Each structure stands twice: as C-alpha cells, then as structure tokens.
Image (spheres, rainbow, N blue to C red):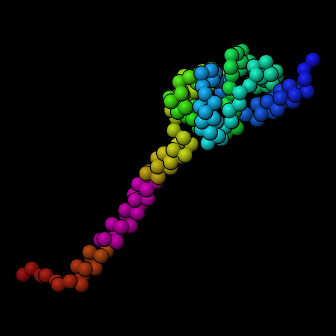
Amino acid sequence: MPTQAKVQSVAALKERLGTAKTAVLTEYRGLTVRQLSDLRKQLKAAAAEYKVVKNRLARLAVKGSPLHPLAPHLTGPTGLVLTRHDPVAVAKALQVFVRTNPALFIKVGFVEGKVVQPPELKALADLPSKEMLRAQLIGALEGPMSQLVSLLIAPQRELVQVLEARSKGATGPQHHDP
C-alpha cells in the first residue's frame, strides 16, 4: 500500500511532467553535492530544473503521459531535467556542464514529443540560440530590401543629376563655335 507522501510525490511529478516541453534523463553517479548544485544553477539560468527522482515513482508518474517512452530508461541513479521553454538552451547548458564534469551521463532526452539520444541532444546544443537565428534572419532580409530600395531610388536620383547638370549648363557661360 503506497504511503500518502509517495502518492503526493507521484502526483507532483506527474503535474511537472505534464507541462514539460523538454525532459532529459541523466545519471549523476560520481558527482559531488557542489557539482549538482552548480548544475542546478546552470539549468535554472536556462529556465529548467534538475530533480533527482526515484525510478519506481518516476515510472508511475510517466505512465499514461506523453513522456511514457522514457520509462525504460529510468534505471540507476536518475536526475531529471525539465523545462517548458527553449530546448536548445537546456541542451547547451547540459553540454557546457558535461565538458567540465564528465561524470554526468546523459541517458536520453524527450524534446517536443520525440525521444532523442545523447548525440541528437549534442546536435541540438550546437544550434544557434533563438536570438541568434532571429538576428541572422533579419540580416538576411535586410540586405536584399536595402538593395531594392537603392534600385527603386536610382532612376529618380539620376533624373535629378541630369536636371541639375542641364540647369548648370543653361545658366553657365555659353560657348559658340564660329
């Protein structure tokens, strides 16, 4: 018979999982408390949370949810990364942490309804951020637009130059050939 605390723990985890856009399962064996604290800080900066979970309770929480494909990977000491925001930022934060703390093992991820393996998460981390992509898009759109404006203005500018030249020629000294 499950205790009330376990029932509440499963319900709370199920609620968090229900709103998550991205989830990543990690194995934290070999990390110190300080390293786990650093990981939590880095993930918090990426609008994510890191929670150590009991596998049996986590399997109950994912049962019947879109995250159900993660159930087979809930083995060993498991840490769960959850976010409702940008999966690229989370993948980047995890990759940065793993570079300096190779003891953190990334088991599998769940991004936008799809199970992703660690190499795919690394590829996601290598993507430019949303802000960088927006800047690149604006730059790509801005260049052709400014060229178009220059092309549209060119005939008027040339006409003005011709008229100015003619007006200077008409008011300037007149040369007559004998």
Residue 106 position within the rendered picture, expressed as x and y whole percent measured from the top left: 60, 23
- Residue at the (81%, 29%) spot, across then down: 14
Q: Main secondary structure of the magenta part?
A: helix
Any magenta on residue 136? no
Q: Tally the marks.
A: 0
- Residue 25 position in % (x across, y down): 66, 24
Side of 55 relative to 30 (left or right): right
Apparent side of residue 34 relative to residue 100 in the rendered image (left or right) = right
**Residue situated in front as seen by the camera: 153 or 131:** 131
Q: In which quarter of the image is the N terminus?
A: top right
The magenta segment is: 145-162
Q: Can residue 84 be seen in this view?
A: yes
Farthest residue in the left direction? Answer: 178
Looking at the image, residue 121 sits to the left or right of residue 177; the answer is right
Residue drawn at x 76%, y 22% as measured from the top left: 54
Q: Residue at x 57, y 27 (%)?
A: 121
Q: In which quarter of the image is the C terminus?
A: bottom left
Query: Quarter of the image holding residue 130?
Result: top right
Residue visible at 61% across and 42% down in the picture: 45
Residue 156 drawn in magenta: yes
Which x, y percent locates residue 115? 66, 22
- Image quadrant of residue 124? top right
Residue situated in front as seen by the camera: 167 or 153: 153
Image coords of residue 132 (percent x, y): 51, 44
Asked whether residue 88 appears in the rendered view, the answer is no
The furthest residue to the right:
1
Q: Which residue occupies the foreground of this view, 21 or 9?
A: 9
